[in-house]
Amino acid sequence: MTDKACPGSGKSWTVDIEGKPICPRCRRSLATVAGKGRKIKDLPAVPRHEKPSRATTRNTRRTN
Ligand SMILES: [Zn+2]
């Protein structure tokens, strides 16, 4: 059951090109994985959140 969690859970935040904290694995923003109004000071590590589903991952390469 634990494999439903994103591998980025518990890791340190990384930032996007705008300097916003995002999950290092799924690259979703802090507001998305932690909720709006949360600050990185309160959350030094990425909270546990669900792994992105394949349906939402559009960058997946397809082998034709
Ligand atoms: Zn993630």
Image (cartoon, rainbow, N blue to C red):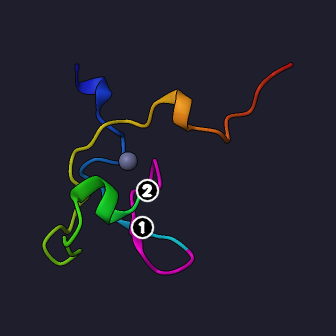
Q: Which portion, as a residue range, is magenta?
A: 17-27
- Which circle marks residue 6 in the picture? none
In the rendered view, would you say 6 is above or below 30? above
Is ligand 1 less than 8 Å from the beta carbon at label 1?
Answer: no
Residue 5: in magenta span: no
Q: Position of residue 55 (x, y in %)?
A: 54, 29
Which is more N-terminal, label 2 or label 1? Answer: 1
In the rendered image of this protein, does residue 10 appear above or below residue 51?
A: below
Query: Quarter of the image holding residue 34?
Result: bottom left
| Spot occupied by residue 59 in the image (x, y as percentages of width and height) | 67, 41
Name the quarter where the C terminus is drawn. top right
Circle 1: element type: strand
Quarter of the rendering containing residue 1: top left
Q: Ligand 1 near label 2 (Cβ, under 8 Å)?
A: yes
Amino acid type at circle 2 is Pro
The amino acid type of the residue labelled 1 equals: Thr
Residue 12 at least partly seen: no
Residue at the disc numbered 1: 14
Q: Is residue 19 visible?
A: yes
